[in-house]
Amino acid sequence: MTTQVHVARNQLDQAELAEVDAGPLADGAVRLAVESFSVTSNNVTYAVVGEMVGYWNFFPAPEGQGIVPMWGHAKVIESNCPDIEVGERVYGYLPMASHLDVVPGKVSTHGFVDMTAHRQPLPPIYNQYSRLAADPEHDPAREAERMIYGPLFKTGYMIDYFMRSNDWFGAERVILTSASSKTAMGLASSARQNSPEVRRIGLTSAGNVEFVKGTGLYDDVLAYGDVESLDRLPSVSVDFSGNGGLLAQIHQHLGDSLKYSCLVGVTHIDDRRGPAGSAQDLPGPTPTLFFAPDHIVAFFKEYGPQKAAEMMASAWQDFLRTVEGSVQIERNAGLEAARDVFVEMVGGTVDPARGIVIEP
C-alpha cells in the first residue's frame, strides 16, 4: 500500500491521508520509497497555480483532489529496470506520499528521466532524477539544505539571469516582495554576485524585518506598510507574494518608474487577485508571470550543459555560505506532519526561520 496526502484543489487548507493500492510494478519501472522532502511556500505556489500550470498532473489523485509535488530524496526498493539497482538513492520531484513508481529512461551515470506516459506533456525539468552516487551536487551533509533551498535558489538564479539578459530593463534597483521567502533570497544572492550595481530592496511583513535584515542579502529592508517611502527611481519589481493589493500599491506609487513587473510565487493566498496574484489596469508595465523551466532551457542552451552547471553550482555554494545558520532545520516524522505543515503553510503562519523537512 501507498500512503498519499490528498489536498482539496478548491480548498487548499483541507487535506487528508489516503491509502492506495500500489499494485504490481510495471515492466521497466522502479518503485521508490520516499525518504525525505521539504515543505516550503514554493509547494503552496504549486498548489495555487496547479490548474493553470499543470502541477496537479504529475501525481494523479481522485477527482477534485490533488497531490502536491515536493523536492526530496528516495530509495529504490523494487526494480524492473536493468539499469537501476535496489538500494540506490535518488533526488528529484516526489509526491507528498510514501512511494512513487517511475519508468527510467535516458539513463546515465548521473541520472534518468521518468518516462511515465502521463508526465510526458509536462515540463521536462521536473521529470529528471539525480542518482546520488554520481551526482556532483550531492553533499550528504547538506541534504536538508538542498531540499529546502535548492529548487527555490535555482528559480531565483534564473530570475537574475533573465533580468541580466535584459539589462535589468534599465532599472537601478530590484524590489522583492516576500523577501523572507527562500526564492527571494536566492534571487537576492544571485543579484548580489552578478549585478552588484543593482540595489536590492526587500519588502516583508513587519514581524519578519529583522530576520530579513539578518540574512545580509539586501541593501535595504522595508515593511509592507512603508512602500510609499520608496524614492521614485527606475525599478523592477519581483512579486513572490501574490498579494494583489500590495502589487497594486507598488505600481501606483512608482508609476512609470517601474520598468518591469515580474510575478513569481504566491505566499499570500487570501489576498491574491487573479492567477498568481496578477492585477489589472495598473499604471506602469503589465505584470508578467515568470516560469522558471523555460528560462533554464535558454540558460543551458546559451552556455552549454557543463558551463551552465558550473556557473549554477558556484552560485549555489556562495548562497549556502551566506545563509548558513539563518534557518533552523526542523525534522518531522510521518505524512501526518507533512499534511499539518502544508496546511499551516497555506495559512501563511510559518516562521521563515524554520526549514521544515518531512521524513515519511
Image: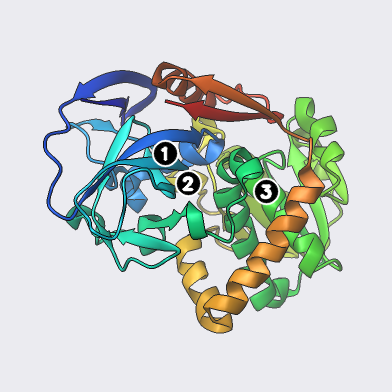
In the figure, residue 309 lies in which quadrant? Answer: bottom right
Q: Which amino acid does label 3 sit on?
A: Ala
Q: In the rendered image, which residue does mark 2 sit on? A: 276
Residue at x 44% of width, y 55% of height: 131
Q: Are marks 2 and 1 in contact (CB under 8 Å)?
A: yes
Q: Where is residue 172 in the image (x, y as percent from the top left)?
A: 82, 66
Q: What residue type is labelled 2?
A: Ala
Q: Which mark is residue 184?
A: 3
Relative horizontal placement of residue 19, taking residue 279 as reference (left or right): left
- Graded by Cα atoms within 10 Å as few (under 14), some (14 to 19) or many (20 or more), the crowding at tag 3 reads many
- Graded by Cα atoms within 10 Å as few (under 14), some (14 to 19) or many (20 or more), the crowding at tag 2 reads many
Q: Where is residue 30 in the image (x, y as percent from the top left)?
A: 25, 48
Q: Where is residue 293 in the image (x, y as percent from the top left)?
A: 46, 63
Q: Where is residue 302 in the image (x, y as percent from the top left)?
A: 55, 83
Give the mark, 1 or 3, whose residue is nearer the N terminus: 1
* SS state under label 1: helix
Quadrant position of the C terminus in the picture: top left
Relative horizontal placement of residue 213, taking residue 151 as reference (left or right): right
* SS state under label 2: helix
Q: What residue type is labelled 1?
A: Val
